[in-house]
Amino acid sequence: MEHLLEIARKQADAVTVFGLSYTVDNVMFSNARLKSADTYLNSGTALTVVKDGKQGFAFTRNLIDREGLVRDALAVLAGGVESAGGLPLPVKLPSLDTAAEQVGGNVVLVDECRRMTDFLSSRVKGQVNAAATRITDDQRVLTSTGVDARCLSTHYGAHAAALYPGTNANIARGFRAKAFTPFPEKDLQFIADTYNASEKEVKAVSGRTRVLFLPFTASALI
């Protein structure tokens, strides 16, 4: 990114370089069996140049031809888009604890999904699904005024559900954390207990009745 900034500075009044890269590990279990395990990497670099009060922009997913990216951004100046103003100067930014070490690859996620589905399958009669996802997100901004800001963050999420026969209706719970953390057993137990309690058929009477809305009900109502 530094090399790209230096090339662009020689041909523009102001330059901003934005870089983003992220990796995703994702595992899915369907009917208590492994359905998919994927890992992928995505990255991109964006360049904004300002010259004579006009702004140009270019983007690439593969930063090989830096000179070509600068030419593309300069070519956009012909569109006459006015610059929004001057670039900010460097400031001391607070350090946030947004990342944790990610270890183990998809093997850890597979083992966790198997643990969740084994727990639920031994307690409910319906189909059991589970999923786990882990993301690492790295963003950086460089400017010709000296700004060099970076944000590294990690995310982990897991989901478990017990489905009613012949339908996609289910009792489910989700879990999120900064890094891999075992799915809380109390939430798995909630799924099992609620599912088993709901198996008792209740014949509704006419008129007004009391209704219990679980947290995910909002998704269906929106």
Image (cartoon, rainbow, N blue to C red):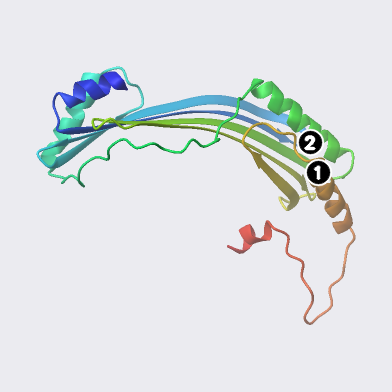
Q: Residue furthest bottom?
A: 207
Q: Which residue is drawn at 55% across and 35% down?
A: 97
Question: In the rendering, at what x and y percent does residue 86 appear?
Answer: 20, 42
Q: What residue type is labelled 2?
A: Met
Contact between marks 1 and 2 (CB within 8 A): the answer is yes
The dot on residue 104 is none
Relative to 177, does residue 142 appear above or below in the rendering? above
For image coordinates 87% across by 45% down, the residue present is 125
- Badge 1 or badge 2: first in the primary sequence: 2
What crowding class fits label 1: few (fewer than 14 Cα within 10 Å), some (14-19), or many (20 or more)?
A: many
Type of amino acid under label 1: Leu
Relative placement, left or right, of 36 versus 51 is: right
Q: Where is residue 145 in the image (x, y as percent from the top left)?
A: 24, 32
Residue tagged by mark 1?
A: 188
Which of the 4 image quadrants contains residue 55? Answer: top left
Q: Mark 2 points at which residue?
A: 116
What is the crowding at mark 2: few (fewer than 14 residues within 10 Å), some, or many (at least 20)?
many
Label 2 sits on a secondary structure element that is: helix
The secondary element bearing badge 1 is classed as: helix
Quarter that holds the C terminus: bottom right
Splitting the image into 4 quarters, where does residue 105 fall?
top right
Q: Viewer-proximal residue, 178 or 208?
A: 178
